[in-house]
Image (tube, helix red, strand yellow):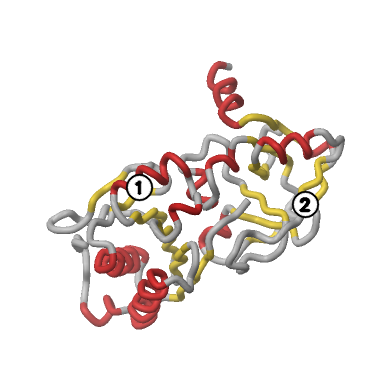
Amino acid sequence: MIGGVDIVIPTGASPRDAMVVSLRLIKRIWPDVVIEDADSGEKSVIGGTELIPEGMTDVFVYQNMEMAKKWDELGAEPELIDTMIHILVRQDEVTVVVDDPNSKMSRLFLSGMKSALRMNIFAMAGPSQGAAA
Amino acid sequence: MMGMMRQFHYTNEKAYKAISSQLTWLFKASQPPMPRVHPFGAYFTDFPIETPNLAKKLRIPKSKIEYFFAFEDVGDLQSIDGGRGEHIFYSADDYPVEKNRQGLHGNRIEVIAMEEQS
């Protein structure tokens, strides 16, 4: 009754900054990324002038809208492997839930995210309020 | 069960029938699907039956949340690591739930509909 692999990444970034940097990294890999607030079910397409909604701490990140709809319909079926990442941001850590941490997509994303979050790039770059993806 | 902390086990019809046919529910420990990262165990959650996006939060197929068991939480389950550990728990061994701890069980959608009508 549990699927996925939980990768816990320590960070000194604030929860808001940790979410912003995580979504920026994913968007580089998935340009048509769609995010969904895990609790409200509200979906957003991020990018351009769209801002990442404030206060999101538990987010499903889909490769695109087609995959988001398939996840709604099926849940975690094998045909949807590597099409959704679940991000949970907490104080001092970010949990990234993926299907297989050794897949090409996951390794690409996780290596970038671990570097960015451990270095706390926002602390070096200054405040990020209202950051766009 | 009102006011008690509850745990839930979600499953498919076949497993539901096997578990519910016994006086004492026995949730058998097993290895979660590949890759083998989560510990061998019987898995539970405190997410109630009406939780939005339940299958996605547990990262399992929707077919595996069709049925559920609810029971009194006596604080003897372990959390998984990370953010999901706030809501996902496991027992490293088979986990029996005797009659005095058992709560609602059945088809999740049907029970939600019944609760909404009452």
Give the answer, above or below, for where A106 lies relative to A31: below
The answer to whether marks 1 and 2 sit on the same chain is: no
* Cα distance between the residues tagged 1 and 2: 32 Å
Q: Secondary structure at mark 1?
A: helix
Visible in this render: residue A89?
A: yes
Chain where mark 1 sits: A
Residue for badge 2: B28
Please provide percent x and percent y for residue B25.
81, 41
Residue for badge 1: A68
Q: Quadrant of residue B106?
A: top right
Q: Does residue A49 appear left or right of residue B77 in this picture?
A: left
**Residue type of the residue flagged with mark 1:** Ala
**Residue type of the residue flagged with mark 2:** Lys
Q: Can you name the residue that lies furthest to the right here?
A: B23
Q: Secondary structure at mark 2?
A: loop
Pick the front one: A91 or A44: A44
Give the answer, above or below, for where A64 lies relative to A104: above
What residue is drawn where x is 25% and y is 68%?
Answer: A28
What residue is drawn where x is 62% and y is 68%?
Answer: B36
Q: Are marks 1 and 2 in contact (CB under 8 Å)?
A: no
